């Protein structure tokens, strides 16, 4: 008996999850050759007996094919009961029947059905000994095992030419398959539990077709790696790490060694007209053996099921229960046109090199959504294109639509993907409470589907939210939980992220030595993997730690090293960050011309990349540069431009910081109402989002503003309260240099000296406060200057920055 293959491209057809059963009379062809009349009599009796049982168990006959039948059942248990009852009814007959049953999605066309489920059921029937029933694990999982006491496992078998690995079970007393043959049902030897957590890398499949079809292989490989990473206790190499290693054209052993994995998944895909030819190989690097290899052909209409088929086989070959983890082996859409455009749009976004490439990717993804409004992955990918470029409002709207669709359809994986992206946007917008709530939902969902890697990643994100909120102890706890999971899974990339983030917390707690130790551990992991990209980003953190700690020359050296790596990799976003950091340190050192050049270069790259968020950060630095140079007229438009970007991208923390700078400019210009409005709004934002990073600076400015505006009993009381509160908040600023805050508070004490309310504060107390603030500011400056080895840099730091000159002058006057 054979299954006809369809050659034409089909329109979109309905799909349904059904149990599919094939029957076939053993030796019928030979019987017909010997005695045609007897053969027809046996066929009639067999058909009558089968139809009676089919009706009893609510089955539906699809078609009769010579001596065989194809039927379906909505209830898998009904299919098994029908098969057993049928075999019992003919057990005393002179003929024997083979039966195969499988469960899965089938495609309807007219009065026929097609698809992998049909092909697997047909193959199981061929493997079944006469008088027996072969069923798949998928069927067994849906049946009451108590009613199948004689079901015997026959192992995991490859069904050649189908791209399927199937756990086969026999019913009716057959304990083994008597003759699997060389072409059918090769058994797969799975890893044992003692082998530990499987570590796997999916190497992007080779595209054997035309260059314009490369997006098929890339997209399916990327989705496959992403979905496999959700399968419980599994360590998947990140695709970015794989791409980096593959640039050197290494051997298989080198790939596995550099990625730190045991198993490699490789394959190819070739689209020819309306057909796809797929090959896959899963190899064990430790034992130097191939676990599973197969090649097969699929119709274009089955494009959206290829990834699920691959994931199903790979998980089974690795000894992981595929059906335990929802969404991994599913077909995400029945609309092949929409899925094809999703793959193409995703690929265009990944290979983009200009704004035109970005717009092209978005256009294709929108076309995909027009064809299938329920395709959550396309919406998530589209939302990510806006998130990556700082267009948070638009990205958030798209992602929330994706979330609503995923919730409505019960798509847990879609919910996870959408919530993760929404959480990132909320965090970047400094909506920390909302981000925390969102990530808590992600954590709960990850736990519900046993996604250990996902739990580790979201714990990192939760830690970053707590860190941004100033809840450093909570952040540390989250990062340490993530680190434990990374060690459990032996997941190097996750481990390095957790180590790096623990370093962030240590730095925030004022322990830069410990922070640098954690950064170094993360850096060593990336170095061992040859991951220059992540090395560059860890170096940025190390540079910032040295910067905050006052080790300016070390910070300068590290930022330049990171910049060199980013340029070598062609990492434009990374280069923009490095240039901005170099601008910051030059500004801090008083090298204003150099700072201006770095900022201009950083802004140019950000604009080229359409990275609105990064452009806003650079504009903030440029505005602060002119503020520190004593040029408020040039500072204000830059700061306001940056503020507008923060509001457009909904970066609340950035908005609060910029309002503080703008308030200082207005205060210096004597525009007191504008200064008051900006500073009070800044403080309100910081309190709203739970961030204490800039409160000390803002409160110091407010204390001065209050006294400049009016001297009265109420304003003196209010200003003193603001001074005390500012000093308390200094403990929450993760920098060593508080000289600006001390300088501004010294101004406030200086004004208080002239007040006439000795019952509130005496002139001596004011002078004591003034001396203390100027002394603290001067000690901070000289402490940092003493750590600068280069005498010219040290001189510039102390003698070229107006605020530093003023602090030194006041200190010398007091002395």
Image (cartoon, rainbow, N blue to C red):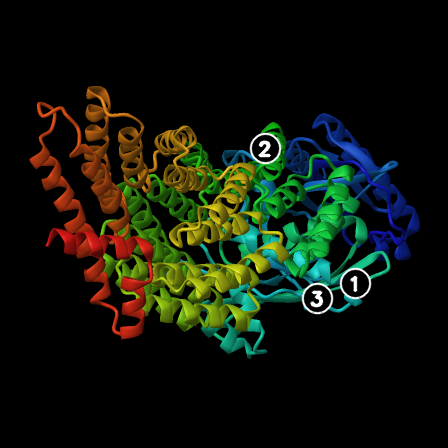
Horizontal side of 613 relative to 347 (left or right) equals left
Please tell me whether mark 2 sits on a helix, a strand or a loop.
helix
Screen quadrant of the C terminus: bottom left
* Residue located beneath label 2 in the image: 400
Lower position in the chain sequence, tag 2 or tag 1: 1
Q: Is residue 166 visible?
A: no
For label 1, the crowd category at 10 Å Cα-Cα, with few meaning under 14, some 14 to 19 and many 20 or more, is few
Q: Nearer the viewer, residue 376 or 633?
A: 633
> Whole-percent x and y of residue 750?
19, 39
Task: Please tell me which of labels 3 and 1 falls first in the chain.
Answer: 3
Circle 3 — which element?
loop
From this viewpoint, which residue is outermost toward the right?
Answer: 37
Q: Which residue appears at 59% of the width and 49% of the height?
A: 389
Per the image, the residue denoted by label 1 is: 212
- Identify which residue is drawn at 45% across, 37% down: 652
| Measured Cα–Cα span from mark 2 to mark 1 | 32 Å
Checking the image for residue 183, the label placed there is 3
Residues packed near mark 3 inside 10 Å, few (<14), some (14 to 19) or many (20 plus): few
> Looking at the image, is mark 3 or mark 1 nearer the viewer?
1
Marks 2 and 1: which is nearer the front? Answer: 2
Classify residue 603 by image quadrant: bottom right
- Asked whether the residues under the numbered discs 3 and 2 touch, taking CB atoms below 8 Å apart as contact, a structural biologist would say no
Q: Where does residue 283 sit, x and y in percent of width and height?
A: 55, 69
Upstream in sequence: badge 3 or badge 2: 3
In the rendered view, tell whether residue 71 sits above or below residue 201: above
> Is residue 41 among what the camera can see?
yes
């Amino acid at each position: 008996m054979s299954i006809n293959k369809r050659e034409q491209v089909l329109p979109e057809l309905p799909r349904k999850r059904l149990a599919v059963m094939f029957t076939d009379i053993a030796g019928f062809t030979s019987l017909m050759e010997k005695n045609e009349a007897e053969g027809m009599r046996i066929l009639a009796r067999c058909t009558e007996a089968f139809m009676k049982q089919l009706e009893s168990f609510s089955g539906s006959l699809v078609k009769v094919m010579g001596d065989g039948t194809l039927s379906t059942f909505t209830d898998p248990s009904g299919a098994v009961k029908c098969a057993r009852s049928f075999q019992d009814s003919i057990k005393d007959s002179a003929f024997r029947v083979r039966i195969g049953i499988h469960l899965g999605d089938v495609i309807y066309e007219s009065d026929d059905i097609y698809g992998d489920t049909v092909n697997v059921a047909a193959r199981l029937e061929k493997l079944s000994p006469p008088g027996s029933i072969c069923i798949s694990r998928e069927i067994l999982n849906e049946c009451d095992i108590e009613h199948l006491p004689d079901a015997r496992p026959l192992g995991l078998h490859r069904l050649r030419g189908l791209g399927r690995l199937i756990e086969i079970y026999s019913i009716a007393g057959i304990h083994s398959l008597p003759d699997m043959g060389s072409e059918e049902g090769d058994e797969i030897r799975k890893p044992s539990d003692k082998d530990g957590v499987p570590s796997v890398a999916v190497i992007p499949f080779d595209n054997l077709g035309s260059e314009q079809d490369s997006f098929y292989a890339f997209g399916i490989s990327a989705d496959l790696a992403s979905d496999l990473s959700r399968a419980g206790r599994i360590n998947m190499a990140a695709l970015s790490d794989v791409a980096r290693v593959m640039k050197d054209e290494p051997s298989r052993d080198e790939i596995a060694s550099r990625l730190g994995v045991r198993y490699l998944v490789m394959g190819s895909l070739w689209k020819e007209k309306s057909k796809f030819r797929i090959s896959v190989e899963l190899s064990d690097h430790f034992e130097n053996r191939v676990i599973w290899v197969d090649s097969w052909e699929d119709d274009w209409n089955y494009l959206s099921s290829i990834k699920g088929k691959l994931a199903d086989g790979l998980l089974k070959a690795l000894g992981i229960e595929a059906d335990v983890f929802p969404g991994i082996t599913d077909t995400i859409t029945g609309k092949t046109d929409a899925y094809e455009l999703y793959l193409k749009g995703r690929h265009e976004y990944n290979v983009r090199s200009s704004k035109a490439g970005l717009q092209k990717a978005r256009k294709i993804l929108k076309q995909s959504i027009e064809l299938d409004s329920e395709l959550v992955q396309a919406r998530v990918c589209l939302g990510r294109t806006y998130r990556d470029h700082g267009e948070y409002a638009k990205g958030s709207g798209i992602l929330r639509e994706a979330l609503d669709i995923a919730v409505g359809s019960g798509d847990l994986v879609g919910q996870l993907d959408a919530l993760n992206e929404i959480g990132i946007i909320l965090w970047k917008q400094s909506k920390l409470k909302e981000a925390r709530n969102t990530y808590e939902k992600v954590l709960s969902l990850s736990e519900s589907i046993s996604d250990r890697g996902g739990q580790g990643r979201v714990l990192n994100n939760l830690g970053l939210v707590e860190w941004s909120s100033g809840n450093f102890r909570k952040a540390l706890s989250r990062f340490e939980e993530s680190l434990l999971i990374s060690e459990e899974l032996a997941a190097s990339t996750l481990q390095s992220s957790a180590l790096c983030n623990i370093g962030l917390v240590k730095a925030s707690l004022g322990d830069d030595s410990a922070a640098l130790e954690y950064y170094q551990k993360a850096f060593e992991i990336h170095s061992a993997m040859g991951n220059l990209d992540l090395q560059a980003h860890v170096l940025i953190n190390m540079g910032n730690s040295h910067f905050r700690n006052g080790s300016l020359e070390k910070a300068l050296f590290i930022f330049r090293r990171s910049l060199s790596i980013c340029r070598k990799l062609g990492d434009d976003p990374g280069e923009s960050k490095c240039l901005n950091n170099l601008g910051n340190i030059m500004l801090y050192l008083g090298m204003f011309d150099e700072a201006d050049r770095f900022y201009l270069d950083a802004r140019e790259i950000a604009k080229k990349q359409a990275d609105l968020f990064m452009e806003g950060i650079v504009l903030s630095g440029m505005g602060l540069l002119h503020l520190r140079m004593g040029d408020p007229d040039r500072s204000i438009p830059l700061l306001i431009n940056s503020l507008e970007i923060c509001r457009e991208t909904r970066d609340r923390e950035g908005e609060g910081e910029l309002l503080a700078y703008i308030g200082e400019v207005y205060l210096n210009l004597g525009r007191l109402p504008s200064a008051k409005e900006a500073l009070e709004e800044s403080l309100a934002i910081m309190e709203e989002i739970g961030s204490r990073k800039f409160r000390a600076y803002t409160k110091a400015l407010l204390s001065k503003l209050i006294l400049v505006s009016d001297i009265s009993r109420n304003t003196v009381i209010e200003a003193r309260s603001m001074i005390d509160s500012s000093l308390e908040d200094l403990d929450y600023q993760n920098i060593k240099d508080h000289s600006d805050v001390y300088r501004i508070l010294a101004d406030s004490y200086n004004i208080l000296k002239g007040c006439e309310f000795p019952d509130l504060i005496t002139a001596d107390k004011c002078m004591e406060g003034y001396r203390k603030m100027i002394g603290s500011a001067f000690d901070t400056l000289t402490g940092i200057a003493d750590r600068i080895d280069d005498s010219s840099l040290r001189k510039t730091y102390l003698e070229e920055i107006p605020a530093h000159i003023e602090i030194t002058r006041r200190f010398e006057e007091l002395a």
